[in-house]
Amino acid sequence: MTPTEPAVVQPPQAPASEQPVVRFDDVNLAFGETPALVHLSFSMRAGETRVVLGAAGSGKTMLLKTAVGLIKPDSGHISLFGEEVTGRKESQLYELRSKVGILFQEGGLFDSLTIEENVAYPLLNQKSIQCPAEDVSRRVREALHFVELDQTLARFPSQLSGGMRRRAAIARAVVTEPPLLLYDSPTAGLDPITAHTIMALIVKERDLSNTSSLIVTHRYQDGNLIANFRYNSEHGGLEPARNGASRDVRTTFMVMKEGRLVFEENEMPRTQEFVLRSSSDPGEPFREIVRQQWTFSLPTAVQENEEYHVELPKVVVLELTIVPEISGGQARASLKSMRLS
């Protein structure tokens, strides 16, 4: 007799039209005594973009790997397109994964394959894609044209710059036209100009194909661009999305720390403007910064044009560097940088 495979336990299902693209329900994962994901729950709808911020080791990459079943959680439920991922065998995940495009850290191209062969790989090796052989070359060229790498078909990854390799990896991720794209630190290790180019391509793909996008990054700038810009197909570039009226895209920000989801909002905290207030004594130094409901003290007396580090109590993983500009009894402080600690 053939042993019976254990049944996959699924949580209650919503109607098909309301099924989230990705759903985590109280997911836990640990390596020994080190937690990687702790009681993680969220759901992502079709057409939605989620930007996951967090420092190294906060659980961002583990979130992506568990979402597609590359790593099994210790407990909880994960579903893709309404179908349970947890509890499935590897062979049972192939069809689900064919609906997901993944940009791995550093691109993840095969060194021994040409760029054309790299981009064609999912079309030729994912059986559920069912791409006719005569269409492979056309789709590869279209994907490379999308990322402006038309002349790289015969080159190997070692012959391309870091930014070009990342663009080729995006072409591989989108060549199957998946409804969901996962981006693992798409701008890591890139200079600011190249990083902007990569994020512009991600916005372009989102707006032209209406894909759902789950982006993990440690760069505040990436999230700002995703949320506040759209792709204009008429002039082929990005433009500000004024008041959100010019595009129907939902962007949700998530901040993770030590495997826990500590922040989840539709808009990222606005940190560009702060007000410094002095005490009633004119001789006292400026010590407080007030921004909306946040009030916190500086560790030293504020001196004009010096840098200060401030931690936001509400979003405890965000640390700011500010540069005060003092004038009279009140002063403004401009944001110089932000990092996740």
Image: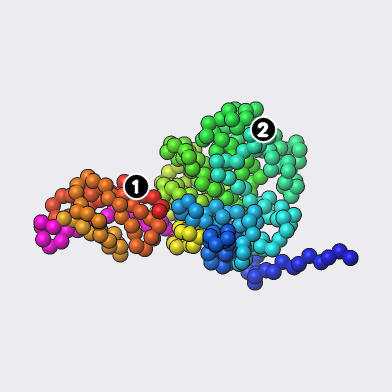
Residue 289: x %, y % from top left = 25, 58
Mark 2: secondary structure: loop
Specify whether 213 is left or right of 122.
Answer: left
Residue 283: x %, y % from top left = 10, 56
Q: Is residue 107 magenta?
A: no
Name the residue at 18% across, 56% down. Answer: 286
Residue 188: x %, y % from top left = 49, 43
Task: Name the one closer to the observer, 36 or 145.
Answer: 36
Q: Sequence-wise, which precedes: disc 1 or disc 2? A: 2
Residue 337: which numbered mark, if any?
1
Name the residue at 50% across, 60% down. Answer: 259
The boundaries of the magenta stretch are 265-284
* CA–CA distance in space, label 1 to label 2: 39 Å
Q: Is residue 273 magenta?
A: yes
Residue 323: x %, y % from top left = 26, 47
The chief SS type of the magenta part is: loop
Say what amino acid the circle numbered 1 marks. Ser
Q: Which residue is situated farthest in the bottom direction here?
A: 12
Task: Name the one closer to the observer, 167 or 67.
Answer: 67
Residue 112: which numbered mark, if any?
2
